[in-house]
Amino acid sequence: MALVTESAAVSHVGRVRSNNQDSGYAGQSLFAVADGMGGHAGGDVASALALNKLLEIDGEYSSAVDAEFALQEAIVSANAILAEAVYEHPELTGMGTTLSALVRVGHSVALAHIGDSRIYRFRDSKLTQITTDHTFVQRLVDNGRITAEEAKVHPRRSVLMRVLGDVDSTPDVDLQVMDTRPGDRWLLCSDGLTGVVENDDIAQTLAEHPSPQEVADLLVKTSLDHGAPDNVTVVVVDISESFTGSTYIAQTVGAASRPIAFGGAQGRKATRMPGLRLHPRAAGSTEPSHFEAQSDDYLDELIDEDRRRSRRRKLTWLAGSIVVAIAIALSLLLAYQWTQTRYFVGQTNGHVAIYQGVQQTIGPVSLSHVYEDTGISVSQLPAYMQTQVENTISADSIDAAKTTVENIAATVPGG
């Protein structure tokens, strides 16, 4: 029996973006996802150009090594096409794209990867991330500077260290050949999925649904349910055995499924902007969701900047804590000073006494103290007056308290 593939590709603009800059493809032996960047000026153009060039190698190969070589050549050509597009259309300067691709050849797959889109393999109920993100935070994780959990919320998590674009004529692409077998399920996706959906949830969806189309639809829906701040593209590939040859209907989704539209002036040499890859998080936004750092010097700069940010955050937190502590202390002081303007009549050591303050306490701290022991014995007072003194009698001022004491003294028999 021959190994065959069943696949599905789905792409969605998400809930925030106004256009889809992702591209996806599921074909005969080739499966790929590209996530474009460069804003409205060219993210969709970059992913579509790269993917359309890659489609030319979809077909049969005598070995996975041949397929790996074809992937490499196609990606280098795609990179050159992007550079030429920027030369002819200066308004596209700064555009780029990630690219993750898989070619199945018999019991093997050839993989190519650059950027932060991902390839996963689901085998024996276990989800394994095959590719490594080419991001700033992943390098920090690899160097032991931060944990994987910290990377998810790091302010520089969108910085890409490698992409296809108009800067590097020889892009550094990860290439490898791996085995595959019946029952394997491969997932290719943009970070619009992995940025909001946890791996455990992805694995559960891959495990519970037999149809690649159903899985792809549900994964995209899950991303949408989590807010989908970015475009999301999913390609699912199942490996199975069959006595007959595989039949397929190629699916192209996202930006590559539409005609490529170039705009702006032509024929002028682009003003280069090395080291920058960006597209807005939302329509009209200028905040980059991805950009590419081209050198280790830039990486060191980012690390130093993060350290400075960390120090500033600590100093700001400390200053804020001091201000809050001072405000609380002043409030407590003013509140205490107010309590000392109040008086009440009660008893102490069997005598009628005037107290300054209020009867409440804060923990072990009493907010009142004996202002004057009048010497009047509580036991000499009539029963009703004893009860009032024991329950305390409030007074608005020291004069009112003394008047209360005089009235109490007048009730003493023979007083």
Image (spheres, helix red, strand yellow):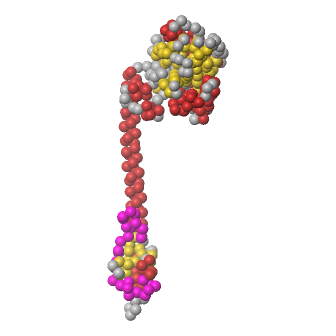
Observer-nearest of 73 and 238: 238
- Give x and y (percent) for residue 325: 39, 52
Image position, residue 378 (x, y; %): 38, 83
Which span of residues is magenta-colored?
358-386
Examine the image and state in which quarter residue 32 appears. top right
Give how far across and how far down residue 67 sits, in percent. Answer: 52, 9
- Compare residues 397 and 165 and report the one nearer the observer: 165
Taking 298 as reference, is 414 above or below it?
A: below
Q: Is 165 within the magenta?
A: no
User: Taken as a whole, is the magenta stretch helix, strand or loop?
Assistant: strand
Residue at the (37%, 81%) spot, across then down: 352
Residue 311 seen: yes
Q: Residue at x 38, y 87 (%)?
A: 380
- Up-down relation of residue 218 to residue 34 (above or below): below
Residue ID at (40%, 87%): 381
Q: Residue at x 52, y 17 (%)?
A: 180
Quarter of the picture holding the C terminus: bottom left
